[in-house]
Amino acid sequence: MDMTARHTGPGASLRQDSALKHATGEARFADDIPMPPALLHAALVLSPVAHGHLAPIDLSPALATPGVVAAIGPGDIPGRNDIAQAGRAQEHMLAEGLVEYWGQPLAIVVAETRDAALAGAAAVRPGIEPLRPVLSVEEALDAGAFLMPPMVMSRGNAPAILAAAPRRLSGTFVAGGQEHFYLEGQIALAVPGEDGDLTIHSSTQHPTEVQHVAARLLGLDHNRISVQVRRLGGGFGGKESNASWVAACAALAARRTGRPVKLRLGRKQDIAATGKRHPMLYRWQAGFDETGRILALEATLAADGGHSVDLSGGVVFRSVTHALNCLDVPDVTISGVACKTNTVSNTAFRGFGGPQGVLLMEDVTHRVARTLGLTQEAVRERNLAGGGNGSHTPYGQALEGDLLRRVWAECRDGADWARRRAEVDAFNAANEVVRRGLGSFVLAFGISFGIMSMNQAGALVHVYEDGSIRLNHGGTEMGQGLFIKIAQVVAGVFGVGVERVRITPTSTAEVPNTAPTAASTGTDLNGWAAQIAATTIRTRMAELAAAEWGVGPEEVRFEEEEVFAGNHRMGFGELAHRCVQARISLSSTGFYRTPGIHWDPAAMRGEPFFYFSYGAAVAEVELDLLTGEHRLLRADLVQDCGRSLNPAVDRGQIEGAFVQGLGWLTCEELWWDEEGRLRTLGPSTYKIPGSRDVPPVFNVRLLEGAPSRADTVFRSKAVGEPPLMLATAVWNALRDAAGCERLDLPATPERLLTAARG
Amino acid sequence: MTPIAGPIVFTLNGTPRRLPPGISPTATLLDWLRGPAGLAGTKEGCAEGDCGACTVVVEEEEGARVPVNACLALLGQMHGRRIRTVEGLSGADGGPHPVQRAMAEGDATQCGFCTPGIVMTAWAHAREGGDPHDALAGNLCRCTGYRPIVEVLEALHDDGVPPPPAPDAPATRFEAPGQVFDRPTSLADLLALRAAHPEAWLLAGGTDLGLRVSERREVPPRVILLSGVPELNLLEAGPGWLRVGAATSYRRLLAACARDVALAPFAALLRRLGSRQIRGMGTLGGNLGTASPIGDALPPLIALGATLRIAGAGGEREMAVESFLTGYRTNALLPGEVIRDVLIPHPPAGALFAAEKLSKRPDQDITTVGLSALIEMEGGLVARARIALGGTGPRAERCGPAEAALAGRPWSREAVEAAAAALEAAISPLSDLRGSAAYRRLAAGNLLRRLWHRQPEFA
């Protein structure tokens, strides 16, 4: 591969497409779009109680507020009051009859200014007869209050093997949820056009779902609504399903008033009203032998789904399929349930249940190691998939044991594990109130959407007569570098510099019926679609050049802004011009669907993932035994990105995901009061990591010489989610430092102080 | 002096701006920038002064660059100042500023929403220097994991560009429909206004009151701004003491404490109080006036025996900080009175002085438990102990039983254990989102125990 300084195709470390515009403030986010004439602003009336009977809402106080133009209750919805992902479950946009969480939207107030809309919303006094809220997942689990039927993945005969196992252990622990805290809050701007058609500018990861949900609420055909997204100020899963209802509210208000309407949630409303990562309660029982080989496992993973299903089905699917992570347990039964509580409906969050799933075996191996006097690393190695152990997941898909062992060995050796283990032990022997701990983690994460139909993508590429290229595809840019990566793919196909490729906003009007940009699949899916579209055009161009030069089309090469065959050459733009003159189409769509994947949800069997992404981590922490304060001193990560399309972007994804995972597992704590009111509603109370929380020694390596074995675009691998889970090593390091059996998450100073005292 | 009504004026990105009459003086700078000024580069991330996406820089006369949160800064507070936003940076060639290029080229931006604020923080840091993490404590990034941002800050150089001239800003009163915003320029004027308008907001830095505008969208009818009163802005160091005006920013207080080795523990605590943005605006007077039970700076003031000067129409009186705080968010100010300044005595030579803070996150986090202590030894025994707590009761206050348990005993593990046990028995903290009552009790005792572990011998 050409890796010279001029190279801008696949493999080049180019920066995010808008990096300089971000730094100068020129990059426009949805709230920065110049205000259209006659713009109105919307605000939401949110439920002040967590559970109760709701009387029909009286909106007259809002209408009496100066500046208010309209107030919209559930009865004012022209279509169906349903925001469920595929319209399968009845999930109300505006509550009717019953409120089920504190912060649930009840009505929309529309006014000339945002302040007037907020004042109008605050004037509404919903009539609610309170009911007792269910706030704990434990209570819901024990009561069997489920949002959907349990998912049970089973292999062999776990009960029998457990009963016969030489040693047995059981455990329980909990992991908290996580607020996305995208820096740009939820926002949408809906602009009416002719005949009541609507254009919606939305900060969404899923423009197609915005289109569908808005159309459903308005009772319109999909073709009446187009959704446009240039960039998001962060998404992390929080702008998958949640962005849809925010945009639908703006659309409703625009439809009702006939004027453009913007709805921007303030931070507190955003955190109150939008879903988060599912908290999880774990109960497990394991049977093992004296060598640490785990023979059988039964486990229940109970996700707190909140009040409605939302994306809980997919989240629980991923938790269950990742519950063994990269380990092999011959006889196993994993049950995944989504419990119903009176909290906001939990949703997608980077990793989508995977991060919760992979915690299970870390608890099991920690406890087994402690019981047998072994290290957790020894127990993990003893049970790693492949080698002498089974290499297939319980659902029947093969893991690559050689890659697993390679990432772990490279990480362990790069981190100088043996020497540092001895140093940590010596430090602890010499210190009474400060302890250090060392922990590790190895990951296998499946790549593809769990819903098979979502594994598709489209792209639209035009080459203009001057040789400039316009690229559009179904993926959204939220900072992850998707746009530049796909532009690199297209530039590579045409053999031109990436600056020739114009990146354009995602639009349902250009590429329809798209999947969300989620599940780490943005590049895998849209990259192939764009590659296919570009290749279609290049083939036509090559045929013309071949005909003119009297050579075979396969001899025509596109490199360095020129087109070659034998002794013939011409500029890329010149060939584009000749194609137009010769009446050859220089526009093509491209369509891709992931091949070979399949899933039987009844049997919980199949090969749902196109491939696995592997990674490993070692973390060292220091813990103050008097206060529970702790800090991460060093982290060493090795992440398998296949043959990276853009190593600079991938490194940024790895570092950022790891720190986000670190926040989930340590400092980010959602706190509800006894009445079910979430009290951590902003950065002053909900603490995401700051710069000082990043380890002072932070070694990140991309696994080298490991092109994807699956037929991915340029043999690269997905990178968005997997490295978040590498932060799990910090949990293990903290337990090592505290010397404790159980450590619930997030591991706040309080939890650590409690755990360290036993 | 009769107030001079007139327009708010300030210099924005080097150009004088005179706001039209009638504009609300309590509109936030952020809303004005993004709205009427048409400068959308500055972002709203939280509207509570915590995420830093709205960071702009106030350029001081002497060249200092003070990052502030535009979401908390009210237009009336900006009168006479020089403000720079991300749109106002440019390099020698008129293109992007080197800081902007460095952020882009260093892969220090992903989604880009926090980036303009971080650029402004970095631009100020290039001049102000210090620890990059101190500079970044007030800026959150959810994408990058910070490593590239820290590297950019470590490599920056000051561009040497002097501040633009300050605008001519004669007005001391800004009026809008239903609103009067006074900016008195002498203590006498302040007291006269205070006496006439006891209901008015007394606005110091606005890092607390600003929330009521920024988040809760309140429109106060009457505001009296303290920052124009010279008597309230003094900062004076003498032999064994520091006198701090009530409206002096934490930024200036920290700089003074950092130069004063006797107050080093206080300086270290102030570095964890808010962020550079908050310290650029927030004041000790504000912390005292709101009398928060967890006011970061209050336990060390109590431990040191700091005193207040309170000014009123009838003259001035002095009072110990510990007596001034009377209960949950209440203080001893009488109607018509204002806090003039605080006298902070040095710890006596040889004494142990500590100012500890426990929070969920080390930087820019509200205290879960604060403990400050001043321990003086004589003849190998504790002669005097002052132990002050925050976050463990309705107000910051001394813990008599713990002090008594130490007095007359050697500074030993046993004595400190007895004091910690007495402390744990004496307090009855609340459970809330920052920690349970049990944790607060144990951690407060342990903060005292930790003093011994860190310094088993002194004097």
Image (cartoon, rainbow, N blue to C red):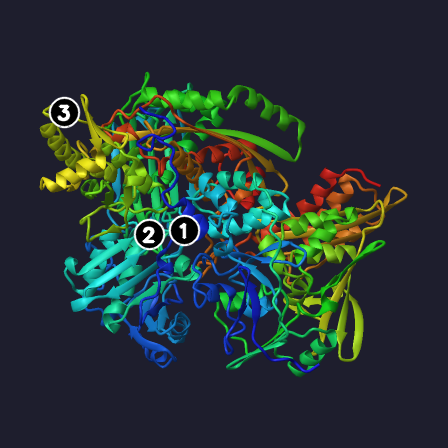
In percent of the image, x 41 and y 51: which residue is there?
Answer: A182
Tags 1 and 2 in contact by the CB under 8 Å rule? Answer: yes
Which numbered disc covers residue A494? Answer: none
Left/right placement of residue A14 relative to residue B396 reads: left
Chain under disc 2: A
- Count the labels in the image: 3
Question: Of marks 1 and 2, which one's residue comes earlier in the chain?
Answer: 1
Is disc 2 surrounded by few (<14), some (14 to 19) or many (20+) residues within 10 Å? many
**Image position of A591 with respect to A326: above or below:** below
**Three-letter amino acid code of the residue under disc 2:** Lys
Q: Position of residue B47 (x, y in %)?
A: 48, 61
Residue underneath mark 2: A239
Residue underneath mark 1: A182
Asked whether residue A703 appears in the rendered view, the answer is: yes
Is disc 1 surrounded by few (<14), some (14 to 19) or many (20+) residues within 10 Å? many
Left/right placement of residue A394 relative to residue A35 reads: left
**Three-letter amino acid code of the residue under disc 1:** Tyr
Residue underneath mark 3: A554
**Three-letter amino acid code of the residue under disc 3:** Glu
Chain under disc 3: A
Left/right placement of residue A440 relative to residue A476 reads: right
**Image position of A410 with respect to A446: above or below:** above
